[in-house]
Image: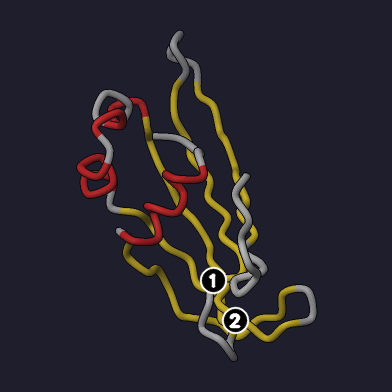
Amino acid sequence: MGAAPFTAISYLRNCVVRGQVQAASLNGVETRQFNFVPDLVKVSAMDISHLGLKDKVQAVQGSVWVDARTNRVSQETVTVQSTDSQGQPQTVTITLKFTDYDAPVEIK
């Protein structure tokens, strides 16, 4: 239940917004930025592989930037605090950048 891209996107679909939405700029683009905490029970229900990992996760929090003009997600950053197989604390941060929404896709 860590920082895989699929999981990070799932966090956005199953979250609670924390604090106020803030006006921000990301790479020169006006955005709205907000912080969130995912509902780990709902995320676990989406992917059975997460069921065994949720007990090792102490906290997950994230931030997302939404383009003010298009309402599309521009960037998401998620930090996961958990324990490794020896019970030692670890922190992982992943940043996903979303671009080229309307670009054609070619699959070979």
Q: Give the side of residue 57 with respect to residue 66, left or right.
A: left
Residue drawn at 45 percent across, 35 percent down: 2
In the rendered image, the residue lying farthest to the right is 28
- Circle 1/circle 2 CB separation < 8 Å: yes
Residue, disc 1: 73
From this view, report whether residue 31 is shown above or below residue 6: below
From this view, report whether residue 84 is shown above or below residue 64: above
Q: Quadrant of residue 24?
A: bottom right
Q: The residue tagged with tag 1: helix, strand or loop?
A: strand
Q: Give the side of residue 20 with respect to residue 99, left or right.
A: left
Residue drawn at 53 percent across, 50 percent down: 78
Q: The residue tagged with tag 2: helix, strand or loop?
A: strand
Residue type at mark 2 is: Asp
Residue drawn at 45 percent across, 80 percent down: 20
Q: Depth check: 84 or 43 in front?
A: 43
In the rendered image, the residue lying farthest to the top is 86
**Mark 1 to mark 2 CA distance (whole Å):** 6 Å
Residue, disc 2: 67
Please rate how many residues cluster around mark 2, counting C-alpha atoms within 10 Å: few if below 14, some from 14 to 19, many from 20.
some
